[in-house]
Image (cartoon, rainbow, N blue to C red):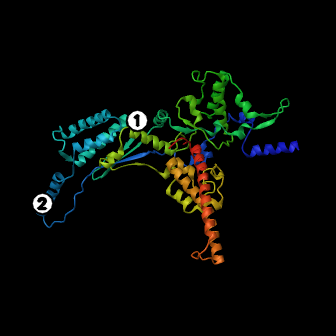
């Protein structure tokens, strides 16, 4: 009986990918295989993509001359002269007073900062149009837009640290495009300054099932021997810890920021040993079954970098999901200009986030259509689930066919559009799924009324109507309680607890 139980446990451990610490230690120093060959999510991205995150569209207001048919040379000359007069004299204008007001509103911060920004623009205005004697005097709108464009691009490049790619205007072009993105280092500094929360790697705390792995019973105490807890409690000497980290780095398993012991921030054996054990679990890719991931404000200290989850993207493996990258870039931009104000005042045409499915980004229109409209064709392990706490939301699990009409790819929606949009779709699918109960009950009630030939307008007590009303009241209370629980699960799963 004992041998059969041991073999069953061994098969279970083999099925979920678990290996004891001694086995993992032997395989740990093997050269790392490229994730492009092993992870389809990484292989989907184009590593040569020159991807930018936002686009500013500047209008040039260049006027196109109308073609006129003439019968003789004299009429042709008169038409050209009239067109020239129209372009030079009757074109649309903008005054310094209007531009100054728009600029004052578009610059964030205190009054002093706004006034300094307006003064800087006035210097460029006078360099181009001359001294401002009359603030209401109009200047050609095309020239004013060109000045605003040059000023915006100059300030963004000098003050924000963003990388810009500008398409220069050509003859007859009516728009100028400026693409921008934030370097990864700038995004990390911004996240650190704002205490932006990131998800910890699953291997930091793989879950209770991992820590309770036992290789047998202690003969003296009669208690299980928890191998992983004993491994975690093992303390390394400083030299041994440094040697282990160096070996992992040479094998390509960890990055250069993780290969050293930090004496200032890791003063004791317990500190550096805990980090070494965590890195070993990350390298070993131990099986994780923790349904409640941990989130914490980002700290760019080297000793903390290994804690945070990394994701494949068009910019390589980074700490940022698309929603994080777009949000933090927008934060950096908003510290220089409020482009919503500039758009309302007509100084720019639009400010939009960029998306390109050719580089591997999801979700695309076709991708969503396959899961929402033609849901029966969606991959069972990528279709999502009717609610976030459903087991089909776990990586590698399949959504049953009968739940596909209500399934939502909530993980992908959240990673691209953010938690606000994802919460709406989580509620929508949850509500649609729970409407099956009243739909089935009311259908049964209608069939009963039809079979019995009951007249709803007849006098007397209609027990079917009382039953439907009572059921709906009870279902409403039940639905509310279930959604309260589900919404809390969403908050824990997405790291948005205590958010409004």
Residue 317 location, quadrant: top right
In the displayed structure, 169 sits above or below 371; it is: above
Q: Is residue 97 visible?
A: yes
Foreground mark, 2 or 1? 1
Is 381 situated above or below 275? below
Of callouts 2 and 1, which one flags the residue occurring earlier in the amino acid sequence? 2
- The reply to whether residue 282 is in sight is no
Task: Tell me residue 41's x, y (percent).
Answer: 58, 48
Q: Residue furthest front?
A: 460
Count residues near mark 2 (Cα–Cα under 10 Å), then give few for <14, some for 14-19, many for 20+: few
- Residue 13 position in % (x across, y down): 76, 43
The front one of 343 and 187 is 343
In screen coordinates, is 280 left or right of 265? right
Give the residue pinned by disc 2. 78
In the image, taking residue 51 as reference, residue 20 lies left or right, namely: right
Percent x, y for residue 162? 40, 38
Q: Please state the total of marks drawn on the protein image.
A: 2
Residue 163, horizontal then vertical, whole percent = 41, 39
Q: Secondary structure at mark 1?
A: loop
Q: Which residue is found at the position 55% from the left and 44% from the top?
A: 312
As displayed, is residue 497 above or below residue 22?
below
Residues at marks 2 and 1, CA–CA distance in whole angstroms:
52 Å
The N terminus: image quadrant: top right
Residue bearing the label numbered 1: 161
Circle 2 — which element? helix
Instruction: Give the numbered dot on residue 273.
Output: none
Residue lying furthest left? 74
Residue at 26 percent of width and 42 percent of height? 101
Q: Nearer the viewer, residue 223 or 255?
A: 223
């Amino acid at each position: 009986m004992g041998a059969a139980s041991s073999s069953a446990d061994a098969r279970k451990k083999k099925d979920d990918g678990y290996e004891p610490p001694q086995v993992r230690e032997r395989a740990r120093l093997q050269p790392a295989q490229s994730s492009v060959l092993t992870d389809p999510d990484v292989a989907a991205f184009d590593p040569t993509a020159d991807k930018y995150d936002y686009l500013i569209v500047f209008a040039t207001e260049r006027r196109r001359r109308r073609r006129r048919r003439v019968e003789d040379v004299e009429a042709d000359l008169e038409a050209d002269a009239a067109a020239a007069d129209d372009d030079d004299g009757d074109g649309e204008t903008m005054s310094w007073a209007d531009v100054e007001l728009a600029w004052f509103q578009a610059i964030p911060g205190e009054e002093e900062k706004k006034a300094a920004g307006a003064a800087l623009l006035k210097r460029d205005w006078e360099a181009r149009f001359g001294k401002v004697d009359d603030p209401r005097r109009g200047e050609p709108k095309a020239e004013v837009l060109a000045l605003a464009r040059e000023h915006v691009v100059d300030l963004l490049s000098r003050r924000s640290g963003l990388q810009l790619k500008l398409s220069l205007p050509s003859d007859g072009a009516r728009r100028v495009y400026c693409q921008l993105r934030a370097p990864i280092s700038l995004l990390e500094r911004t996240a650190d300054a704002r205490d932006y929360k990131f998800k910890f790697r699953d291997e930091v705390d793989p879950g209770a099932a991992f820590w309770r792995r036992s290789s047998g019973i202690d003969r003296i105490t009669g208690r299980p021997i928890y191998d992983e807890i004993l491994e975690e409690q093992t303390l390394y000497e400083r030299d041994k810890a440094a040697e282990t980290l160096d070996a992992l780095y040479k094998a390509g398993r960890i990055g250069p920021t993780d290969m050293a012991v930090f004496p200032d921030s890791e003063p004791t054996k317990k500190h550096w040993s805990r980090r070494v054990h965590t890195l070993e679990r990350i390298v070993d890719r131990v099986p994780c079954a923790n349904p409640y991931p941990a989130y914490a404000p980002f700290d760019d200290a080297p000793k903390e970098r290994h804690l945070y989850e990394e994701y494949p993207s068009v910019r390589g493996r980074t700490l940022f999901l698309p929603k994080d990258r777009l949000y933090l870039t927008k934060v950096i931009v908003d510290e220089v200009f409020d482009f919503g104000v500039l758009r309302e005042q007509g100084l720019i045409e639009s400010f939009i986030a960029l998306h390109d499915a050719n580089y591997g980004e999801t979700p695309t229109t076709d991708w969503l259509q396959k899961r929402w409209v033609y849901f029966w064709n969606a991959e069972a392990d990528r279709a999502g689930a009717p609610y976030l706490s459903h087991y089909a939301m776990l990586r590698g699990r399949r959504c049953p066919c009968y739940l596909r009409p209500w399934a939502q790819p909530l993980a992908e929606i959240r990673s691209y559009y953010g938690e606000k949009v994802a919460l709406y779709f989580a509620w929508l699918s949850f509500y649609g799924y729970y409407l099956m109960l009243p739909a089935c009950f009311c259908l049964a009630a209608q069939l009963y009324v039809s079979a019995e030939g009951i007249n709803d307008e007849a006098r007397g007590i209609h027990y079917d109507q009382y039953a439907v009303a009572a059921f709906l009241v009870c279902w409403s209370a039940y639905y509310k309680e279930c959604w309260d629980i589900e919404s809390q699960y969403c908050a824990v799963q997405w790291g948005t607890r205590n958010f409004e």
